[in-house]
Amino acid sequence: MFDKRLIREGRSVWRFLLLTISLSIGIALLAVAQAWFFSGVVSRVFLEGANLKETWNFLLMILAIIITRAIFQWGSEVAAFEVASYIKLNLRERLLKHIMSLGPLYTRGERSGELISTVIDGIEALEDYFSKYLPQLLLAAGIPLVILCFVFPRDWKSGGILLVTGPLIPIFMMLIGKLAEKKSLQQWKDLSWMSAHFLDILQGLTTLKVFGQAKNQTRVIERVSDSFRSSTLSVLRIAFLSAFMLEFLATISTALVAVTIGLRLVNGTLSYSSGLFLLLLAPEFYTPLRTLGLNFHAGLSGVNAAARIFEILDAPLQDENNDDQTVKTDIPGLSGNFRITFQDVSLTYQAGGTQVLKEINLSINSGEQIAIVGPSGGGKTSVAQLLLGFINPTAGNIQINGVSLDRISKEKLLNEIAYVPQNTYLFAGSVAENIRLGRLSAGFEDLVKAAQEASAHEFIMKLPEGYDTYLGEGGARLSGGQAQRIALARAFLKNAQLLILDEATSSLDLESEKYVQEALTRLLRGRTALIIAHRLDTVFQADRILVMDQGQIVEAGTHMELVREQGLYHSFLKEYRGEIG
């Protein structure tokens, strides 16, 4: 079970890996020396009648060897741990960075609990692979050969027995491995499924309670847990069976060596010290093979986890050719005069799927506020996702001052944009920490000023600890309107020149909408904005209104111009006023 991709991960720490293997081989050589001195002492004491004084130096040598072996063993384990720790840290950073680069569209198509399980449990499963299985895989080939180099010159018969019986253990291990592979993979899938399902239930607990389905989900969790228990027990049964058989084979093989040595001792064809020396080396010959068998399942778990890890890492990025080295130095930022253009932009999320956007052409000039309205599914949010760089157009081009968007670093682009989505997400942390996401270096005075501009300061000060009040995951302690004002405070603090507002006032009660609208008026002042709206009263003052339907811009103009055209916008307006009239 030699995974090439995992081996490549170990190249960066080959020195520690080499140290682990070297120390382990040193331990094997010390075991040979210990057996040699011990057999010599026993032979001299029992056959030659030597006293303590005559064997004292040999006993001190044996003690020194034992202490040195312990030190080597400690050093080997520390080095192996360093190998595993570095690879885990590096791989977890790369995995998280890649998931972040893949963006929200990728994570929406995955189960959050399964991704969490991969990032945490999957990476942790690699520790035993690199610290135990991989070094032992190399030692299982090297140490027996070292032992044979000392056995054959002393007794070719014992060496022949070791040479013949030794391969039986890895052969049997591979046979067991074929049986264990599917079971171990199923165990990993069950663990990922259980993690994903449990997180889904936690996130949707309110909905389950409201619809009276909480108890049903408890039974589902029981079934999923029982499936994981069954798969785990299946793996453990195979592990126990393989451990028993490996021990049995090693014991029988050692006994076979012992019997042949005993017969020749009786016949006088082998000296006592040589026989004892060979008998002490026999277990050392099988030890690395047995240890490899015991660590085989740990290695199997690591390989199964790695398959999912590399599957995520292999997911292509939207802008995998876009790095800082390809960014032109003369690309202007969005702080001065700029022009954003969409040129025949089309978008399809999946190959062969329906076009979400069809040959969109539009321009946004600095200082201009453009609103996009239309029915759900018309492609409004997709325009914002394209401008944010979360996805690339299937066809066409997006440019800033004549420079293609895919030539601009995504990080630099997002630094110039403030985004207020429809569903604001607040992280588990204080109010101040959530607002400071807009600008991490901001001082407390700037933070308070941003909150005041967002009409959030007053309600924040009424919280138990003000700006230090801890918010639960998703901002559970705040109302929707309060959470949205926290999002606006982030935008004020970021002070970007380009704003993207995606249904920023939807799903708010009238009082909250009033506060949010006042904050939005202040936020939009003097800034360029792309406003995606459902409530039409939020777009009346826009410089231009684009009406989208089925992925196309079907109407464009000011509010009054579109009303006079008596088109789709006029129909929306009549329907909207009828709902609120």
Image (cartoon, helix red, strand yellow):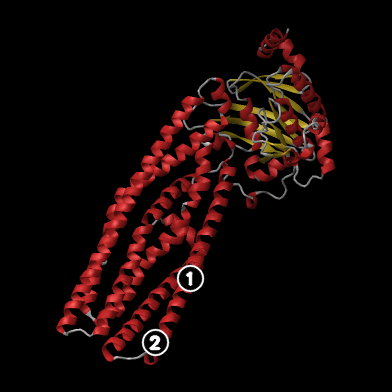
Q: Quadrant of the N terminus?
A: bottom left
Cα–Cα span, label 1 and label 2: 29 Å
* Drawn side of residue 374 relative to residue 178, left or right: right
- Depth check, mark 1 against mark 2: the one in front is 2
Answer with the quarter of the image where residue 534 lies: top right
Q: Mark 1: few, some, or many residues within 10 Å (few <14, many ≥20)?
A: some
With respect to residue 425, does 407 lie above or below? below
Question: Closest to the observer: 178 or 570?
Answer: 178
Question: Closest to the observer: 335 or 60?
Answer: 60
**Residue kind at label 1, given as amino acid type:** Leu
Residue pointed to by mark 1: 19
Q: Mark 2: few, some, or many residues within 10 Å (few <14, many ≥20)?
A: some
Q: Which mark is on residue 58?
A: 2
**Is residue 401 visible from the viewing direction of this image?**
no
Residue at horizontal 40 percent and vertical 78 percent from the top: 30
**Residue kind at label 2, given as amino acid type:** Phe
Percent x, y of residue 408? 66, 44
* Drawn side of residue 370 relative to residue 167, left or right: right
Percent x, y of residue 77? 48, 66
Residue at horizontal 42 percent and vertical 39 percent from the top: 190
Give the mark nearest the N terminus, 1 or 2.
1
